[in-house]
Amino acid sequence: MARLVWLIPLFPLVGTLVNALFGRVIGHRAHWIAVPALGASFLASYAVFVRVSGGETYTGDLFQWIAAGSFQTAITAQVDPLSAVMLLVVTGVGFLIHLYSAGYMHGDDGYARFFTYLNLFVFSMVMLVLAGNFLLLYVFWEAVGLCSYLLIGFWYQKQSASDAGKKAFIVNRVGDFGFGLGIMLIWTTFGTLDYGEVFARADASVSVATYTAIALLLFMGACGKSAQLPLHTWLPDAMEGPTPVSALIHAATMVTAGVYMVARSHKLFEMAPVSLEIVAWVGGLTAVFAASIGLVQTDIKRVLAYSTISQLGYMFAGVGVGAYAAGIFHLVTHAFFKALLFLGAGSVIHGLSGEQDLRKMGAIAPRMRVTAVTFVVGAAGLAGLPPLAGFFSKDEILAAAASEGHTLLFLLLLAGAFMTAFYIFRVVFLALFGASRLSHEAAHHVHESPAVMTVPLAVLAGLTVVAGLALGLPSAHGTAFSRFLAPVFPAEEAARGLAVPLVSVVVAVAGVLLAWLMYGRRPVTAEEIAVPKNALHSLLLHKYYVDELYDAVFVRPLFALSGWCARVFDLGVIDGAVNGIGRLVVAWAQGLRRVQTGFVMNYALGMLAGAVAIVAFLLARAR
Amino acid sequence: MLPLISFRAIAPGMALAATACLLLLLDLLPTRGRKDHLAVVGLAGVVLSMILSLGLWGSDERAFNGMVRLDGFALFFNLVIGFATGLVLLLSIDYLRRQGMESGEFYILVLFSAVGMTLMAGAGDLIVIFLGLEVMSLSLYVLAGWFEGRLEAGEASMKYFLLGAFASGFFLYGIALIFGATGSTNLDRIAVAVAGGAARDPLLIIGFGLLVAGFGFKISSVPFHMWTADVYQGAPTSVTALIATGSKAAAFAALLRVLLSALRTVQPDWAVLFWGLAVLSMTAGNVVALAQQNIKRMLAYSSIAHAGYILVGVVAGGALGGGGVLFYLLVYTFTTAGAFGVILLLERDGREAVAVSDLAGLATRHPVLALTFSVFLLSLVGIPPTAGFVGKFYLFGAAVRTGYVWLAVIGVVNSAIAAYYYLRLIVFMYMREPEGSPTVLVPSLPAGLALAVALWGVVQLGVLPAPFLDLAQAAVIPLLR
Amino acid sequence: MGSVIAFWILAALVVGSAVGLVVRRNPIHGALFLVVNLGGVAALYLMMHAEFLAAAQVIVYAGAIAVLFVFAIMVLIPGKEETGPDPLRAQRWLAVPLGGFLALEIALVLRSTVFTTSRSPATVPGGVEAVGRLLFTDYLFPFEVTSFLLLAALIGVMALTKRKAS
């Protein structure tokens, strides 16, 4: 099994290197390297998955990375049911998206560069999932982030794209700062970073306060990566990247790393019940918060971005109430239908020659049949209509919340489900059906995407339909999915009756109906969609002014401070002071002259003050 | 009675000094203006010194009546200094010719300053530390003003010289007071006196405070940092690299030796002081760096911030903190020498490209160079798997382990802030188009070699750091006995 | 008691002249304050029985280096040594008798002490032999390093001036 496991990251790594080194020669044939690499990686993942379902697991070191005294960390791969599932999703969805990209990015200048980054991303994500200790997890946590920033800023000629890349980087640093501290705290508490040993040593001998600190710091990292409140602001901007990137990284895989990490370290979270509570509430609030913003957005990709944030919130809510398997199950089904929706949106954008604005779409279903059908399947999956995958996975989370006594949280999530159904079918009606608001030019060019793009759509639609029924049917021993994950997570309770599913279906259908009433029943004009009707609408349209708030509270004061400090501390080279005083030929003497302008005296005075302060401090302490 | 005269104990430094003297003679030979061979001979001397250091590994002895120590600590720093000097020599060759400032004395002075650095690293006596400091500094003062035709160069050299002399005054007075309090300048004997109750003597305390001021200048810690930006900007870029790497490493070596071997018994007293200096340096350095438009100035403030990070390890102390400091200095040497090496190869409109905006579009024009620079910058940020990450991990980890949790928190917050200004350079390289004429790369084989070595260092220490971490921790052990 | 009083007088002189050196704008005045300062320090050395050091201080610093300073100032900044008309012209005639008295005093002192002492200067703790012994035993290494330091300074100066000339 060892060889098989190492093959999974090896293929995309080789693909990266080949495209990076010979990209100029390969050019528009880059997909012939990248796509087969992913295919092979997927096959290896599948083989590993089969072995794991047979009860096998694997832990092995590639080599010792850091070994200093008592502290040892190796490049360790660990395969258990959880990582096997994640591997399948990452390489499987990744493969489909690679395939799709070959069509979508066709003719782009940076074709080879694109596939280089994409392969590098899959390599890093696979390693993140395979990592057998926290340090390696952190390393590839940063690595997937790096790929994400590179790909967000892929079309760097657009100012907004490179700004978005930068924003993603900075916001994630805030989360990673907590994550890094959390890992350090794990190290100092347990003396190791190895998953197995840390979880084995996590018992009552360590104080609850320590566990709470560790868990919350780790969760801070998860908030950054998975775009949860209050660090969610980067994800919508990340939509500046190419659409396949949004699908792969900012919907299906990387952003779920936070959920994966929390689920992986659930032993630590469980030792501090407060932290789980916080995870659940942050998830629930984010779910509603982001869904409400999604209600009014006019950019098709932004709606999907807020939808992603909201759905990640559901996953955290699930994990937070202790329904780990349900959270991960939602992660998997979400990967299917959200990738499908993004790729479908990409296909629409492609068909409309780059148009992303919902106000300039409409009635394109007849001309793009495959896209339309698959998109509706994805939307229904997201809305949680039975018997699609989203219904089962979301239901698991809702049921868990209800039965664990989190009634308020349950109601919150239910409200979110209503909004979800509404906003996604708003997109369906505005983009695909109703009256055409296309410009004459665009209307003329509308065309279905090539097979290389529609086939992945069809496959993902198929998965959205099948996955729930196959894996998510509740039984007396939990779902098939939770049974598979039983070695990792404590067994979940048996089926919980029909009340919750019924309520959620009613709510979802109500949402769809409302969307139809507002946008589907009769043609709407562009103005109707765009102009805010009231203060609430305006508040939502401006995303609760969070960006503006951060700008005013953090960004601007910091720069003001920096500018002020620079003026005070950094006198620098004074231009003009020398001019007109006279013309000494030798620069040495000019240097001397500037010295006499007083700055060196100031510097020396500062040093003297420093020395006096240090001596005074030491003397005061010695008393 | 004559003291133990052991050439073994000073062999690495002797190799450098002898090479410098050899260069003095070689410089007299007529050679149609080319001075490359001097750099090559100098480089051979540096390599020889490093080989000697490796050969002497494992020895732990004192010579010249305790003036000189030959231990793992000194040898580790000899390697760091060797890397710094070697890289600077390689970087200087074509650079000086391009600027029309090639001269044999340049390489000779670089070697002289390296001799001073090795003296500081292997000193067992405050007097020797001071003399090493002066040998190093005198050479650097002259080197900083090498481009005499430039306004900033004269200013840099003059400021560096005057303020350096001022700092030396503090340092020397500190030594005198410590001598007064303990009756010796030898670190071992000071340690005995301190353990014996001299720790409360106001003379010793004042002397120590003045010593810290002197060291603070050389490591460019706040509030002794003001020269840094001006000097970094005005000095030739390869000299800036030497000031940022070698001289900082040597000053930290001496500081650590004084603290850990002479004053270890009163660690709680000085740890608080360095806690404050670390926080001030990190924060001020990073905040001011945000506003910089000149890359060399930005890296100057970055070096102030890095002095703060390294002080975190000093505060933590012990094998863990000390080892962290040593390892980080090695990492920082590769990273910073590499970063300055990249800048030194860039020209725009016939002048050195040192403005942030000069980097625009570099990635499309020179992808390999841009990637190399990005690796150095990511290492400065501390992004895994570069060396900077492992280094920071150890420094902050040591602080957490020894109970200075808040210091680690402040350090991590600071590196999050710092990410912004390093990233800005990457954004410019990869995501901006140049306005006006583009920045061009001046090809240079020796500089390319230097960059390759630096890149190797950053990757090696990031991916396979274990053997070097072991070395760094083992090197601190002799100080703790 | 006497030595304490002498110390305080000398200390005041040394500090006062140092302050004078810093605050005076005229470089020649500064140089003269430096001479006073160095001389005062030499006297302090004497009080600590560091005779050799005191002698070296007077000869090297107060003598050679101070003179070098004055020369340098006169050559490099010509005109600055002019201090205007001397306000105390009338006192000049005092110089001749006072100088004569001084010469007489020196002659008397020389006659009475130097040639009659039985003590060899070399055996004094702060004398030449003691300092020399220390320099070539305990402090051999710093001593040699100092020569290297001087070499570095020499080359630095050469580098600076050579490039000026070319």
Image (cartoon, grey):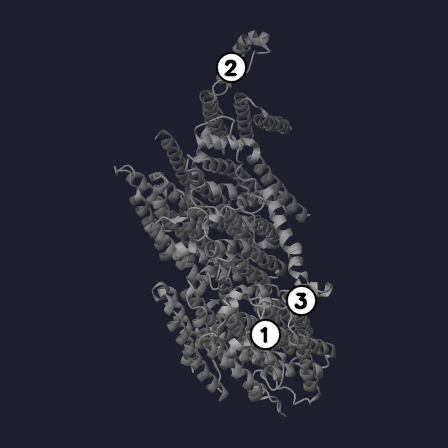
Q: Say which quadrant the N terminus of chain C sits in.
A: top right
Describe residue B194's horizontal placement relative to residue B34 as left or right: right
Q: Mark 3 points at which residue?
A: A528
Q: Look at the image and tell me whether residue A601 can be seen.
A: yes
Question: Going by the picture, which residue comes out furthest to the bottom?
Answer: A476
Task: Give the percent coordinates (x, y) of residue B353.
Answer: 43, 46
Task: Give the percent coordinates (x, y) of residue A255.
Answer: 56, 71
Amino acid type at circle 3 is Glu
Q: Is mark 1 on a helix, strand or loop?
A: helix
Amino acid type at circle 2 is Leu
Look at discs 2 and 3 and give the one toward the viewer.
Answer: 3
Answer with the quarter of the image where residue B317 lies.
bottom right
Q: Name the residue under label 2.
A: C108
State which chain disc 3 sits on. A
Q: What element carries label 2?
A: helix
Q: What element carries label 3?
A: helix
Please report contact status of discs 1 and 3: CB closer than 8 Å, yes or no: no
For the residues tagged 2 and 1, is the chain the same? no
